[in-house]
Image (cartoon, rainbow, N blue to C red):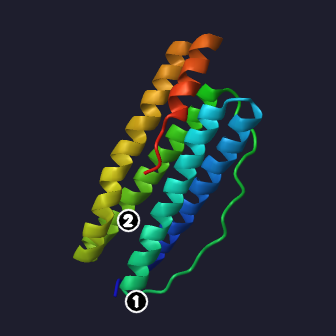
């Protein structure tokens, strides 16, 4: 069983992952309202992936017979500006999640909880991918600028994202 500190940290991470799921779902709704179905689909897939991350930690705590407490999930914004601003928000959020995962990993190291360190290693690797993807899309949107045909091409490409 993990220590109380680790249990609390992992419960906070569940809360953070669920917020991320809500945030991406709000972004999906926003993109859909702006007639960007590819952005909407990509964000919806991302929302589902973040919920999966929360469940992965949930299951880990359950398997370790630790207490699970689902904290309050803050309401995400409803407006995100341009697609570029939306992806900048997504990238910044992924960087925040990365910091949280690293803090939890460092705590597990200090507590000598090797099982939690191994579990969190997956998230450390996953966050590298999450940040890279958000960063690449952000960079492409920066290159596209206000060019509508370029934006529509990116929208079509994002529509092709396959569920994990």
Cα separation, mark 1 vs mark 2, equals 18 Å
- The answer to whether 87 appears left or right of 33 in the picture is left
Which residue is drawn at the image coordinates 65% and 13% (left, top)? Answer: 148
Q: Nearer the viewer, mark 1 or mark 2?
A: 1
Dot 1 falls on a residue whose secondary structure is: loop
Coordinates of residue 15 in the picture (x, y in percent): 56, 66
| Mark 1 vs 2, N-terminal side | 1
**113 to the left or right of 15:** left
Percent x, y of residue 149: 61, 12
Of the pair 31 and 100, the residue shown nearer to us: 31
Disc sitting over residue 65 in the figure = 1
**Label 2 SS:** helix
x and y, in percent, of residue 119 in the image = 30, 68
Residue 154 % position (x, y): 54, 23
Quarter of the image where one finds residue 31: top right
Q: Looking at the image, can residue 146 be seen?
A: no
Q: Which mark is residue 104?
A: 2
In the displayed structure, 88 sits above or below 17; it is above
Q: Quadrant of residue 150?
A: top right
């Amino acid at each position: 069983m993990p220590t109380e500190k680790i249990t609390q940290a992992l419960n906070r991470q569940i809360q953070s992952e669920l917020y991320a799921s809500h945030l991406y779902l709000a972004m999906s709704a926003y993109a859909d309202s702006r007639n960007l179905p590819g952005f909407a689909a990509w964000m919806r897939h991302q929302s589902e992936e973040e919920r999966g991350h929360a469940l992965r930690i949930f299951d880990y705590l359950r398997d370790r017979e630790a207490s699970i407490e689902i904290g309050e999930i803050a309401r995400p914004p409803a407006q995100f500006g341009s697609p570029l601003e939306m992806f900048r928000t997504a990238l910044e959020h992924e960087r925040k999640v990365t910091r949280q995962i690293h803090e939890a990993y460092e705590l597990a190291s200090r507590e000598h909880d090797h099982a939690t360190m191994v579990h969190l290693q997956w998230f450390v690797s996953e966050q590298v991918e999450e940040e890279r993807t958000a960063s690449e899309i952000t960079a492409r949107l920066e290159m596209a600028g206000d060019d509508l045909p370029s934006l529509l091409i990116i929208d079509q490409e994002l529509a092709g994202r396959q569920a994990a």
